[in-house]
Image (cartoon, rainbow, N blue to C red):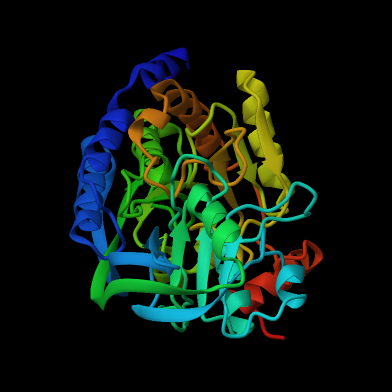
């Protein structure tokens, strides 16, 4: 046993792949860079021993960033468009809604106004409010434009998509501004008219998922996944180059232990996650959900040393993760709540057992993620290797005949979302899939 651990802890396979894809540059969904990243993932999975490495293409809504700005007084304040913002301009009175909690929208008249909200939520609030939820509260309130202000210092405007599955292009212009620009706007132009301008090229495009397998050719499968796309403003090293590097590293380690696998392991590097889980949604529509025993979705790993697992109320998944962590004497965190914001979700929402595997950073919100600062220097090779050891052993355990977990009724997932106060936000952004 110790031999595979030693080889994993000294392996360069995952890290070399991570360097390869960050050097691609722009991996925005539907771009040539995303395709080159996918091709690199296919080739890397094949090179470490996975079989039938291939690409599966599908159509998506393409979007390319142009120049954007907020004109306030006689100044042009730096801003970047949020992906899938419509192209064009909007004028209105500038209003700062602080955190942009649901009550902030309910208590203020924002009709025809340019609304700014922060990228974080206060520590006293009981749940995370996603950017898209805040955006659609603004749309519902009749706002003219949406300004998303970073809570992280360093002159770093945040990115992140808007739009829904039914309407991929958002309703009103949307931009991200740095904490510093946001503070300036609130101090100098609160209550004054400002203009938000967005330039974007909106077009038809294609994306692709990467697939490969290891283990016996069973009808049942374990999905080990990540997403290969990234935002065009940075290297996408943490989000989610590290997750795709983890998939490559796990494939290498599991190829060495293939004789121990009692269930097929299906590796998937999804495309177009950052624009609404399009790639995983595409696969979920084409896959028999009963064939999936469990999902290990790597999105946010290796950003910090301690792994965290959203277990979505599956006690068996919680126990399995804790058992492996105890075996290796390595701390982890398990989170029982629903986590509807990555590529496991198009499956888990229908009751498929799945993890969202992340890592703790000690920072609030995304930290460096979705900014120019999401670069390779933020990731430690030690963390990638250590976590690969734990996740390899966990995957072998999930793939064993002794591990059993049952699907949940979708109604149970829906009830959990209601109990966790997540349902209302999902409904406003068009992500509520259940019949009322």
* Residue found at x 45% / y 70%: 174
- The one nearer the camera, 258 or 347, is 347
Is residue 69 placed above or below 304 in the rendered structure?
below
Position of 340 relative to 257 (above/below)? below
- Identify the residue shown where x is 55% and y is 35%: 394
User: How many numbered discs, if any?
Assistant: 0
Q: Quick one: quadrant of the C terminus?
A: bottom right
Image x and y of residue 306, in percent: 59, 29
Q: Residue at x 42, y 42 (%)?
A: 243
Instruction: Give x and y (percent) for residue 26.
Output: 25, 52
The answer to whether 41 is drawn above or below residue 125 in the figure is above
Residue 127: quarter of image: bottom right
Q: Nearest the camera: 423 or 291?
A: 423
Q: Is residue 375 left or right of residue 342?
A: left
Q: Quadrant of residue 40?
A: top left
Image x and y of residue 192, in percent: 56, 73
Can residue 158 be seen from the camera position used here? yes
Q: Name the spot of residue 68 as percent of width and height, x first.
A: 34, 66
Q: Nearer the viewer, residue 253 or 182?
A: 182
Q: Is residue 182 positioned above or below 276 on the image?
A: above
Left or right: where 189 falls relative to 260:
right
Q: Residue at x 75, y 46 (%)?
A: 123
Please say whether residue 429 is visible from this viewpoint.
Answer: no
């Amino acid at each position: 046993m110790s031999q595979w651990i030693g080889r994993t802890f000294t392996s360069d396979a995952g890290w070399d792949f991570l360097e390869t894809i960050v050097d691609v540059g722009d991996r925005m969904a539907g771009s040539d860079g995303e395709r080159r990243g996918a091709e690199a993932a296919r080739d890397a999975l094949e090179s470490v021993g996975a079989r039938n490495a291939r690409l599966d293409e599908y159509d998506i809504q393409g979007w390319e960033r142009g120049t954007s700005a907020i004109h306030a007084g006689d100044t042009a304040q730096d801003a970047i468009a949020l992906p899938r913002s419509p192209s064009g301009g909007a004028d209105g009175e500038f209003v700062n809604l602080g955190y942009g909690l649901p009550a902030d929208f309910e208590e203020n008249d924002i009709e025809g106004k340019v609304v700014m909200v922060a990228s974080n939520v206060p520590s006293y609030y009981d749940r995370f409010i996603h950017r898209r939820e805040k955006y659609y509260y603004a749309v519902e309130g009749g706002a003219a434009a949406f300004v998303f202000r970073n809570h992280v210092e360093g002159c770093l405007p945040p990115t992140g998509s808007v739009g829904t599955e039914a309407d991929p292009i958002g309703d009103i212009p949307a931009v991200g501004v740095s904490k510093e620009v946001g503070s300036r706007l609130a101090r100098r132009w609160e209550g004054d008219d400002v203009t938000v301008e967005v330039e974007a090229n909106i077009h038809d495009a294609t994306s692709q998922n990467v697939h490969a397998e290891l283990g016996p050719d069973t009808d049942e499968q374990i999905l080990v996944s990540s997403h290969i796309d990234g935002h065009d403003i940075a290297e996408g090293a943490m989000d989610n180059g590290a997750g795709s590097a983890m998939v490559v590293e796990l494939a290498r380690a599991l190829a060495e232990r293939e004789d121990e696998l009692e269930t097929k392991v299906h590796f998937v590097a999804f495309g177009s996650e950052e624009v609404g889980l399009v790639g995983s949604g595409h696969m979920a529509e084409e896959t028999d959900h009963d064939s999936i025993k469990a999902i290990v979705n790597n999105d946010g790993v290796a950003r910090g040393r301690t792994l965290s697992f959203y277990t979505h109320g599956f006690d068996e998944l919680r126990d399995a993760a804790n058992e492996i962590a105890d075996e290796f004497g390595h701390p982890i965190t398990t989170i029982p709540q629903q986590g509807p914001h990555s590529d496991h979700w198009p499956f888990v929402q229908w009751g498929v057992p799945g993890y969202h595997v992340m890592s703790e950073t000690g920072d609030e919100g995304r930290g460096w993620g979705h900014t120019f600062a999401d670069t390779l220097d933020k990731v430690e090779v030690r963390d990638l290797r250590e976590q690969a050891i734990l996740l390899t052993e966990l995957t072998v355990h999930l793939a064993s005949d002794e591990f059993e977990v049952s699907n949940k009724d979708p109604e149970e997932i829906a009830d959990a979302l209601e109990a966790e106060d997540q349902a209302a936000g999902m409904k406003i952004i068009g992500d509520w899939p259940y019949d009322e």
